[in-house]
Image: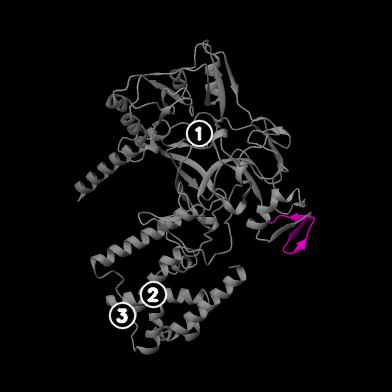
Amino acid sequence: MNGTQWIIFILIVQVIHFLGTWKLYVKAGRKAWEAAIPIYNGIVLMQIINRPKWWVLLLFIPIINLLMFPVIWVETIRSFGKNKSVDTWLAILTLGFYITYINYTQDVDYIEDRDLKPRTGLGEWVSSIVFAIVAATFVHTYFIQPYVIPTGSLERTLRVGDFLFVSKFHFGARTPMTAVAAPMVHDTIPVLKKRSYLNKPQIPYFRLPGFQTPKKNDIVVFSWPADTVRVFFKAEEGVQKPIDKKSNYVKRCVGTPGDSLSVVDGFVHINGEKLELSDRAKVMKNYKIYSRKGVSSRLLGVIDASDYTRKYIPATLSQNQLNILRANGIAAGSDEKGKPVILTGPQGLPIELIRELRLSLKEESPLSRVANMTDEMVAKLRANSSIDSVVMEVQIKGTPGYNVFPQSPYYRWNVDNFGPIYIPKAGSTVEINNKTIPLYKKIIRDYEHNQVKVESNRVLINGEEVSSYTFKQDYFWMMGDNRDHSEDSRAWGYVAEDHIVGKPVFIWLSFDNFQDGIRFNEKLRWDRIFTTVGGSGEPVSYFKYFLILLAGYFVFDFFRKKKSKSAS
């Protein structure tokens, strides 16, 4: 629905409200016409049901209004003596039209000084839960949203298992675009595993004023533009999602509207200049390590490298042992010479499993090995006398990469040598032809809602041949710091301004073995708890200061209560 359609819809709702309640307004000592004036009729209704006038605002906030309308319906009928459970259920199940029935068929009296306290313990409990959800939904939608890092695309800047608070107000909160959805959940209802929203109706995009816009080097949470996934890691037909119900991704903004961006030998360049990253950015790349003495996994473990393979050579490997290893998610089998091998990631083989299977094995230390490392890790390796060389792996310029934007034969790009590419700015105009349309087709068609068709050498937008296009909104380029292990804008292109969710500001909890699932053996990263995401220099944990303040509060509260007790 566009803006005009929503205005018409709201006016229809106002007419229905007037026709269904005007007699009740009169019985409450008000004028009939007061039920017909938008917004004002809501203020008057709040006075009739003895509720705060500011409740009217909650009726215009998407998602929250879905919770408030049933409350208003029930409060209205109770103000006219309808207090039975059957009345409550009729008001809710008829979507408020039970009020219309009362308006025209029941001779009811207005209860001016109605007791607002719930008459039963259950009623009080339900009332408290509803308003707790309303408050939490309001904060979650417009101020702060909790978020957890599920993948390693920003390692080691943000770690898998970091629990974040994401600010909505830095960039300005994006108001919900999905009109009907369950509160406090994203696209799926937990436990039920069902979709939490209806695709229609949709509310026009609107963003509240913020005090920042995403700039280069900012870490940003956004709605994944290419998301058609109903359930991750499950092969099935894709689904179309509203923008605000797409999966949330977190990456680093490396390109802003109006920039010309390129990636040269693995390094981002903006307008021809190499991008200077924040000193907190822990960019990782794949490096090939050489040593005549062998590259041991012990050495790589000391520097905390990742994404390398450990190869074990067992003396023997029975079919039963093979089955148990595979059941534990460990690759095992035979090499090209038919000898048994076991392959793992950096974590190696669990000692418990080695003992259980009574494996007799040795680990291979190959002469060369590929590992994913930061600049600091590389420096430590190069300083080690047993290492001959450490060389960054870079895909050759002009060699097309797999799944690289814009997936066109005109652009032989890969993740290490990419572009240059223009990042559109609202109001800017670009030339459109059969060569440039692959770069901008998704923007024009999916983000700015036009029909695009290419016929031979002609490009048609909404049925008309064009040679240029003017963009309606700003776009950004997002990339992961874990450059060789991140699906980002290099795969699916631009991120539209209306997809921006917020800015991570605070890590309040962090688990080292988060991907193992909940096993009550989580290892806390104490140095990351209560640290800020932004800023410069090494992150500092404020957890101990929080504990000191918390202890101080309890001491203060103890003496305050003791003093109050002695005074009485």
User: In the rendered image, which quarter is residue 339 located in?
Assistant: top left
Spatial separation of the CA atoms under disc 2 and disc 3:
11 Å
User: In the rendered image, which quarter is residue 392 located in?
Assistant: top right
Relative horizontal placement of residue 202, taking residue 74 as reference (left or right) = right
Numbered mark located on residue 73 in the image = 2
Q: Earlier in the sequence, mark 1 or mark 2?
A: 2
Q: Are marks 1 and 2 in contact (CB under 8 Å)?
A: no
Q: Secondary structure at mark 2?
A: helix
Q: Is residue 22 visible in this depiction of the protein?
A: yes
Q: Is residue 30 visible in this depiction of the protein?
A: no
Relative horizontal placement of residue 539, taking residue 433 as reference (left or right) = left
Disc 1 residue type (three-letter): Glu
Q: Residue at x 51, y 63 (%)?
A: 199
Task: Determine which residue is flagged by label 1.
Answer: 155
Task: Determine which residue is flagged by label 3.
Answer: 82
Tell me the crowding category of disc 3: few under 14, some 14 to 19, or many 20 or more residues within 10 angstroms, Cα based.
Answer: some
Residue closest to the eye, 376 or 542: 376
Q: Which residues are magenta?
A: 458-472
Q: Earlier in the sequence, mark 1 or mark 3?
A: 3
Give how far across and how far down residue 132 sits, in percent.
36, 58
Q: Residue at x 53, y 11 (%)?
A: 292
Give how far across and how far down residue 95 sits, in percent.
41, 75
Q: Residue at x 28, y 44 (%)?
A: 557
Relative horizontal placement of residue 189, taking residue 206 as reference (left or right) = left
Disc 2 residue type (three-letter): Trp
Give the main secondary structure, helix, strand or loop, of the magenta stretch: strand
Q: Is residue 312 above or below residue 165?
A: above
